Image (cartoon, helix red, strand yellow):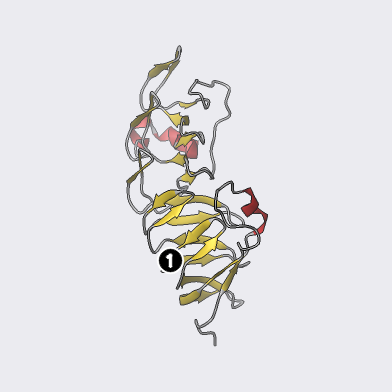
């Protein structure tokens, strides 16, 4: 019978860490981390840990998971999700306790859920507990968020995530295209319009998804961004 004492889950970092352009990030030599699973352990049928609460901080790539956090593990030992037990900093962005981090393969942060609506980098971001979450660029700038309220960003009237009924149920099919997307310099890259608007000589209708370049110019030929 397994006991929680001295059970540890090896986190495989792989080559993904080398792609993280962050000053002070873990190096390939010291990034292999062990998740100190000592509480609330659950197991897969083959006896490998499936989830636990960690007793001390550990690293998943360039992200430090604080002690007291609950983590879910994949069968191969990689961390799939982490429920932050304390406030933490992720790619330079402060996130509160209760935030859920979701990882892709290896150590790649895919998206995160905030425990409540809160302002991040000047934008009121919706809290959530399911679906596609907010995203960050590796430099810590916002990549994509669900806005908690209509907001004018870089002169563009962007719709909130809760305006589906007002915009018409047909916009649901747009999925994460309805999020506000940003370039890594902080400027708006893509958004769904909350109202009719004329921008830079072009007329757009409420509910349209428009794109802008890093310089803020309307890009009529840009491929629409989305990620599930």
**Depicted 148 relative to depicted 56: above or below:** above
**Mark 1 Cα within 10 Å, few/some/many (few <14, many 20+)?**
many
**Depicted 113 relative to depicted 159: above or below:** below
Spot the residue most to the front: 24
Spot the residue most to the top: 201
Rendered image quadrant of residue 192? top left
Q: Which residue is drawn at 50% across and 20% down?
A: 217
**Depicted 10 relative to depicted 225: above or below:** below
Question: Left of 50 or right of it: where is 53?
Answer: left
Q: Which residue is drawn at 53% across and 81% down?
A: 6
Q: Residue at x 38, y 18 (%)?
A: 197
Mark 1 secondary-structure assignment: loop
Q: Which of 55 and 126 is in front in this view?
A: 55
Q: Position of residue 190 (x, y in %)?
A: 48, 30
Spot the residue most to the bottom: 1
State the residue position of label 1.
Answer: 69
Q: Residue at x 44, y 64 (%)?
A: 66
Q: Where is residue 210 in the image (x, y as percent from the top left)?
A: 48, 25
Question: Left of 104 or right of it: where is 179?
Answer: left
In this rendering, the count of numbered labels is: 1
Q: Where is residue 158 in the image (x, y as percent from the top left)?
A: 38, 30
Q: Position of residue 206 (x, y in %)?
A: 39, 24
Image quadrant containing the N terminus: bottom right
């Amino acid at each position: 019978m397994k006991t929680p004492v001295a059970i540890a889950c090896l986190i495989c970092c792989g080559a993904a860490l080398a792609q993280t352009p962050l000053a002070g990030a873990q190096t390939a030599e010291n990034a292999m981390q062990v998740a100190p699973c000592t509480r609330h352990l659950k197991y897969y049928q083959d006896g490998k840990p499936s989830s636990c609460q960690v007793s001390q901080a550990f690293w998943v790539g360039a992200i430090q998971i604080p002690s007291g956090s609950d983590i879910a593990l994949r069968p191969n030992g990689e961390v799939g999700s982490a429920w932050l037990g304390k406030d933490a900093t992720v790619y330079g962005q402060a996130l509160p306790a209760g935030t859920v981090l979701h990882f892709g393969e290896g150590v790649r942060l895919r998206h995160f859920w905030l425990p409540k609506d809160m302002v991040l980098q000047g934008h009121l971001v919706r809290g959530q507990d399911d679906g596609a979450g907010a995203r960050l660029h590796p430099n810590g700038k916002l990549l994509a968020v669900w806005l908690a309220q209509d907001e004018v960003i870089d002169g563009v009237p962007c719709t909130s995530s809760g305006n589906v009924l007002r915009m018409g149920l047909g916009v649901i099919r747009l999925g994460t295209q309805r999020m506000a997307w940003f370039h890594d310099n902080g400027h708006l890259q893509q958004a769904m319009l909350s109202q009719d608007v004329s921008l830079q000589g072009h007329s757009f209708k409420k509910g349209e998804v428009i794109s802008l370049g890093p310089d803020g110019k309307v890009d009529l030929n840009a491929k629409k961004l989305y990620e599930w």
